[in-house]
Image (tube, coloured by chain):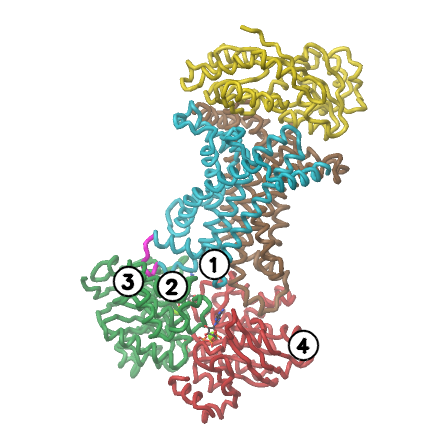
Chain colours: A yellow, B cyan, C brown, D green, E red
Amino acid sequence: MKMAVTTSFHNSGLAEVLLPEIAEDLDLEVQLLVVGTGQALKLGQAGDVDAILVHSRAAEEAFVAEGYGTHRREIMYNDFVVIGPQDDPAGVTDAASAADALQRIAGAEAAFVSRGDDSGTHKKELSLWSDAGVAEDGFGAWYNAVGAGMGAALNTASGMGAYILSDRASWLNFGNKGDLGLLYAGDPVLFNQYAYLPVNPDMHGHVKNDLALKLEEWLTSVRAKELIEGYTIGGETLFVFNATSE
Amino acid sequence: MVDLWSGLSQAFWLVVTLDAELLEIALRSLRVTLSALVVACLIALPLAGLLAVRRFRLRRAVIAMLNALMGLPPVVVGLVVYVFLSRSGPLGVLGLLFTPTAMIIAQVVIIVPLIASIAHQSLRELWQEYHDLLISMNVTQGQKIRTLLWDARRALLTAALAGFGRAIGEVGAIMIVGGNIDHATRVLTTAIALETGKGDFGLALALGFVLIGLAITVNIAIHWLSRTEREGNW
Amino acid sequence: MVDLWSGLSQAFWLVVTLDAELLEIALRSLRVTLSALVVACLIALPLAGLLAVRRFRLRRAVIAMLNALMGLPPVVVGLVVYVFLSRSGPLGVLGLLFTPTAMIIAQVVIIVPLIASIAHQSLRELWQEYHDLLISMNVTQGQKIRTLLWDARRALLTAALAGFGRAIGEVGAIMIVGGNIDHATRVLTTAIALETGKGDFGLALALGFVLIGLAITVNIAIHWLSRTEREGNW
Amino acid sequence: MSALFPLVVEAAKTTRRGKVLAGPVDLRFEAEGTTVVIGPNGAGKTSLLRMLHGTARLSGGRISWACGTEEARHHQAFVFQRPIMLRRSVEENLIYPLRIRGIDRAEAREKAHQWAQRVGLAGMMDRAAPSLSGGEQQKLALARALITDPKVVFLDEPCASLDGRAMREIEEVLMTARTGGTRLIMSTHDMGQARRLADDVIFLLHGKVHECADAANFFLTPRTQQGRAFLRGDIVE
Amino acid sequence: MSALFPLVVEAAKTTRRGKVLAGPVDLRFEAEGTTVVIGPNGAGKTSLLRMLHGTARLSGGRISWACGTEEARHHQAFVFQRPIMLRRSVEENLIYPLRIRGIDRAEAREKAHQWAQRVGLAGMMDRAAPSLSGGEQQKLALARALITDPKVVFLDEPCASLDGRAMREIEEVLMTARTGGTRLIMSTHDMGQARRLADDVIFLLHGKVHECADAANFFLTPRTQQGRAFLRGDIVE
Ligand SMILES: Nc1ncnc2c1ncn2[C@@H]1O[C@H](COP(=O)(O)OP(=O)(O)OP(=O)(O)O)[C@@H](O)[C@H]1O
Ligand SMILES: Nc1ncnc2c1ncn2[C@@H]1O[C@H](COP(=O)(O)OP(=O)(O)OP(=O)(O)O)[C@@H](O)[C@H]1O
Ligand SMILES: [Mg+2]
Ligand SMILES: [Mg+2]
């Protein structure tokens, strides 16, 4: 079966742990299509994949509402972190909340890199900006929308010595080339929920819904919970399993 | 610079240890690209011959168009091929999306104009030389084209190699229609894009160097093969 | 298929309403590519001339190498240029990363081998014709090269147009070195890649059609310009 | 096979970018003999031959073969002023027109060897044709034209770079062909050759037929003053 | 300027893929006169001239000009058997060798017009050179060779496709050049022309100098049997 996943999920490296186990347990070969969130939803709509695993709640709910997906099942979450230059010119380290951190960046007009690609991360970032009371048209030259994937955006930020909002997995995998540092994390609004959506077989008769359901069952099982919560990079746990058994 | 050295050393180790995964995607790269090249040549070379030999009203327009299509942005080609092959598209029933075949189709679309343009360029020169003779011999269009293609075969090599180069280094289109699926449609370029996306520039560069090495090997092999059958100085 | 029609109609409206943002990135595309083309031609054409005219020991190797480099994967070029221009790289102090200049550099690297290979192909033919005459006139190497370039100028056009096409449609390299930053380094191809990632295939296709239209316009304009000065049938 | 002749030319002319290269000419060729086209450089000899043969586009008038153009084109051959060599070996050059006509390779090679012998190229079958000497190329072009037994052969200064003996031999080959019923239409600057071969003469001037006469008459007593001047090697106005 | 002559050729030969095209030859040329190279097709006339001129690579022996090769190359010109036309207008073709020598455009055009007049191409200055007729191309090549006032001119069958009058005129041009001190070394198949122009004759056979003699003597009484046979137009063994 084919599953479209977002770049950030794939970049976390978790897929490489899960896929062999799935193949073993279910005798099921899952082919991953690593694309942007928008493109993943698009592939689902067209019926070119059997299921999608993304993290953009509003878009997901619309996807189900329009009948492209049968339902939405939350699997796990990780969190976003604010990355920036070690010397921290905007003083983000001392921020009280995520909104505060962003306000400080805007106030200092410190260079900031945005994914700018309409991905889950990007949407999250925009909503954080609006929470922080910084309107989109208030962005000055310090705000760089790069329109690229997470790894590439981190690289850009590292190249420019800029702040950036990243998911923790990508950040850890990035391995910090350059002099960036994790400056702020922990605000609950930064949680990043991943959800699994099987494509609706009523819309596309050829999708392998049975396999998709089998996979869903596995993803929400105890076995998956162990694997997901046991996955660490540099000693840090990345994902928190939060699937509810139906 | 660190990335560069790390890339070089990783490339070295990948190659000397004959890394199984590398071998798999490198072979897939070659297979896809060579298939695309063969198909593209079968289309482009006769087309170039026809354009050289035949005067028809829209000839100049077709040539200008071919030249322009050399600039077909791969991503757009990828999208268009995707739209056709997608389940909800007209050819969806064939189930070709996210298969090597889809990648071959996209590459063919990209390199046919390139090969045809460059080939036409050489054939035109030769045709100016042969024109009077072949017309005088009352040769059919097909025979003219075959004669030109045969006698210009060394020059056509450049055209084919340009096509090969373009195809093997191309990523935008095959990423969209192939999907970069591990063990199915992952080739060198999409693997490089993936590693770049992850920010692992060292590995990306290593794969890149392997790719360049592959391209150079193929080129030298072809040059060498075509030199052995060399007789005159054409 | 819906995407295709939506793309066409969006392209139409974007163009007729002269959408400001479209205009900005289209002009940037043109500026970057034309600059790269000029620089690349200044390097590649004399190089092609030299390879045609001068026999030196490594000549065949250089030619095979150029042919191979036609296949330089853009992503790899992007990475290498990135490594050099990045803050921690040897040219970091110039602060060129994520600027249009960096994109021009990457494009030049990509199209120089292409232009040089194709140009060399035509010049070689002409050189075979002129060889005896120019040697007999005791012409210097520089004069030989200039004579060849001038008398083959129409054929060199194909080479330049191939380079233009490759450069304007290229995305992998300029994405990495330019960063696709809005209002700074976003060009048509990177915008297309972005919209594709967003899943907005309609808009991506629309931009793609605009890009193709642009390429065709430039080609036809150049063909037309070069035809007005046409005298003989060479 | 129906007869090609008479070939009737009515007010035919060929132009290039508005400039008249040859014509308008009215001529009639019968089935037998050798016609020699003479005239100063740039008079239009090459253009006239090409027009008759059909490789130069007619921009006015008519050229009609008795059997229709399509069939006629099959039975013609042309030897160009500047030999055009296929970038192949001498043998491949000779074989080419036969293969085009569907004759099988073995038979074609057989014939190629006969003809190479006849024009004195027997020892060079494997040489690349473009590397032959000037005279050798002319011989090859001639053999390649005659190898298909055409009914009409156009020859544009076929002996310009041949040595004395080769010229004599080639003239013999042409004479044999003529006796065998091949119609020859050739141009030359060698008045000696013209006298030896011509049955009738076309004297061209500025693209037009200035005089068209029986060879014997023309060389003895040209009707026009220009004809006389040309034969003397004087200025022709 | 130091003297170019004598030109001494010692055991010089030129080969191509192992085959000897011409040589080994030993020759000595003095400063004055016209040398005519004759011999059957494929004898190596073109190869010999190209070797003397320096466009064919020497694969053995030595060719030494009195003043050194570099300077000598500056004062030579070559008219090829098959005229090589630059893909430019007639005028540009004539101007080219002058511009190469750094002469300014106005002066070069002036000279080009004079020479076009002399060889009878005055009316075609703006024509594309490759579209000229065969004879016109030969005239142009000749004018382009002589326009730089070279001290030595090599001519490879320069009159092969010229009409009677053009040939006479070109011969006059050559005679004038010779009187003006230009050394001419030419090949031809036209024995009449050889007799008219030659001061001495080199008779080539199979790439070797078979006979090298004073023109008057050679044409009256060739020393070798092959020489006699060649002049008669017989088989030369
Ligand atoms: N493409 C062309 N454009 C313009 N003029 C041309 C073209 N081709 C030939 N001519 C001119 O037409 C005239 C006739 O040319 P043609 O080749 O028929 O002469 P010709 O009689 O064969 O001369 P020659 O004896 O020198 O071969 C010449 O003056 C030539 O310059
Ligand atoms: N590149 C080559 N490779 C092999 N043989 C060659 C090459 N070029 C010339 N020859 C041969 O060398 C011999 C001498 O050639 P050359 O052109 O000097 O003859 P030539 O005396 O000028 O003859 P012509 O009177 O026909 O012009 C010929 O037999 C020719 O076929
Ligand atoms: Mg002629
Ligand atoms: Mg010769």
Q: Give the magenta range.
A: B135-141
Neighbor class of circle 1 (other Cα within 10 Å; few <14, some 14-19, many 20+) is few
Nearest-to-viewer mark from 3 and 2? 2
What residue is disc 3 on?
Answer: D11
Mark 3–mark 2 Cα distance, whole angstroms, equals 40 Å
What residue is disc 1 on?
Answer: B229
For label 1, the SS is loop
Q: Position of residue D51 (x, y in %)?
A: 33, 62
Mark 3–mark 4 CB contact (< 8 Å): no
Mark 1–mark 3 Cα distance, whole angstroms, equals 52 Å
Using the image, name the chain to which the residue with label 1 belongs.
Answer: B
Mark 4–mark 2 Cα distance, whole angstroms, equals 45 Å
Q: Is residue B136 magenta?
A: yes
Mark 3–mark 4 Cα distance, whole angstroms, equals 61 Å
What residue is disc 4 on?
Answer: E68
Q: Is mark 2 within 8 Å of ligand 2?
A: no
